[in-house]
Image (tube, rainbow, N blue to C red):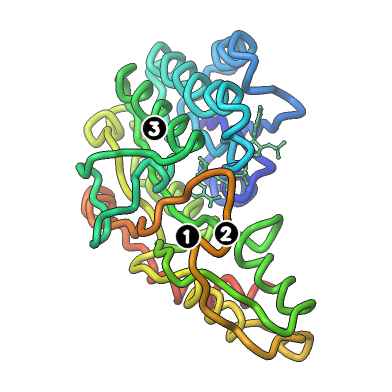
Amino acid sequence: MKILLFGKTGQLGWEARRALSPLGEVYAYGRDELDLTNHDALAKLIRELKPQVIVNASAYTAVDKAESEPEVARAINAKAPAVMAEEARALAAAFIHVSTDYVFDGNKNAPYVEEDPTNPLNAYGQSKLEGEQSVVQVGGAHVILRASWVYSLRGDNFVTKTLAWSRKQETLKIVSDQVGSPTWARMLAEAISAMLARSLPDPHGYFLERRGIYHLGGSGFTSRLDFAREILRLDPNPGEQALKRLEPALTTDFPTLATRPMRTALNCSKFEQAFGLCLPEWGRALELAMKEF
Ligand SMILES: NC(=O)c1ccc[n+]([C@@H]2O[C@H](COP(=O)([O-])OP(=O)(O)OC[C@H]3O[C@@H](n4cnc5c(N)ncnc54)[C@H](OP(=O)(O)O)[C@@H]3O)[C@@H](O)[C@H]2O)c1
């Protein structure tokens, strides 16, 4: 299988490059090789490479910065996926695209299902929603996977930040009113790889039959505060912590440029049923992730 992967340096892309490699040739691209705001170059690359599968792990993910440059966010999160979807359809290739829980407003008091109405609260969420809509509109053999609170052991994310704060601060205040489904980037990458393995020998036909939007996060949900508590409990080097107190805070205590949705837990049963896969509980995945440090 010839797989074209975008976003190879990101949290998900890094893991996907490894997880997809047993399936065939993976052509992995980062910003250095191709800037996704250059849509003509993107279309040309896909036409020349002729992949059987395109996996888009790239995105403009700077949620606050997107408020001041919504057009750049839109070029990467909405227009580039539309080009990928169009070129995939022309080649009869499968297209796996990743989206976000931030397409929701977070006002539902239960985990979101795929059919729930979207209503993004910020420019990032709006650009990701437009990406979803354009991929659906193009048609073809596409699958859109909405993830939530993605973390990895590399780069800047809630897990690595919490550990870093715990080394420097005696008191840590974390919001208790934001709820989500933490998703280990490796688990997400492995789920994509498992889906693709099941799609053989006909990825196009397999995904055409199952095309649509799916939620794919760590199973269950938690608050940011309890997520932080678990990260600190599972810290492989607790002796390095300077932390004495972990205290609850409210989102309003930390004003940000972009408004965040408060409760975006995802119900992932549609994904599990459609692909015959099971998603580990978020705490179990975190435990496995922390053993990697
Ligand atoms: N992070 C989260 O909490 C979260 C939550 C829900 C859903 N998601 C979704 O999950 C997916 C993966 O997210 P992630 O956390 O792995 O993202 P990430 O770590 O921020 O990685 C994004 C990737 O996109 C690349 N990229 C950005 N702009 C580009 C451009 N103009 N041209 C080419 N490449 C560009 C980045 O390259 P550089 O390294 O060069 O910038 C990076 O490789 C995305 O669709 C995201 O929307 C993320």
Badge 2 crowding class, 10 Å Cα cut-off, few under 14, some 14 to 19, many 20 or more, is many
Residue 288 lies, in percent from the top left, at 54, 74
Circle 2 SS class: strand
Residue at x 23%, y 61% (from the top left corner) = 110
Q: Are marks 3 and 2 in contact (CB under 8 Å)?
A: no
Q: Amino acid at mark 2?
A: Tyr
Residue 180 lies, in percent from the top left, at 40, 62
Q: Amino acid at mark 3?
A: Leu
Compared across the picture, whether 278 is left or right of 72 comes to: left
Residue at x 37%, y 30% (from the top left corner) = 132
Q: Which mark is residue 129?
A: 3
Q: Earlier in the sequence, mark 3 or mark 2?
A: 3
Q: Which mark is residue 102?
A: none
Q: CA distance from mark 1 to mark 3?
A: 19 Å
Task: Say whether mark 2 is within 8 Å of ligand 1.
Answer: yes
Q: Quadrant of ligand 1?
A: top right
Is residue 88 among what the camera can see? yes
Q: Is residue 35 above or below residue 90?
A: below
Question: Which residue is label 2 attached to?
Answer: 151
Between marks 3 and 2 in the image, the one whose residue lies nearer the viewer: 3
Question: Which residue is label 1 attached to?
Answer: 183
Task: Say whether mark 1 is within 8 Å of ligand 1.
Answer: yes
Q: CA distance from mark 1 to mark 2?
A: 6 Å
Q: Nearer the viewer, residue 291 or 228?
A: 228
Q: Quadrant of the C terminus?
A: bottom right
Q: Amino acid at mark 1?
A: Thr
Compared across the picture, whether 78 is left or right of 155 comes to: left
Q: Earlier in the sequence, mark 1 or mark 3?
A: 3
Q: Are marks 1 and 2 in contact (CB under 8 Å)?
A: yes
Residue 125 lies, in percent from the top left, at 45, 38
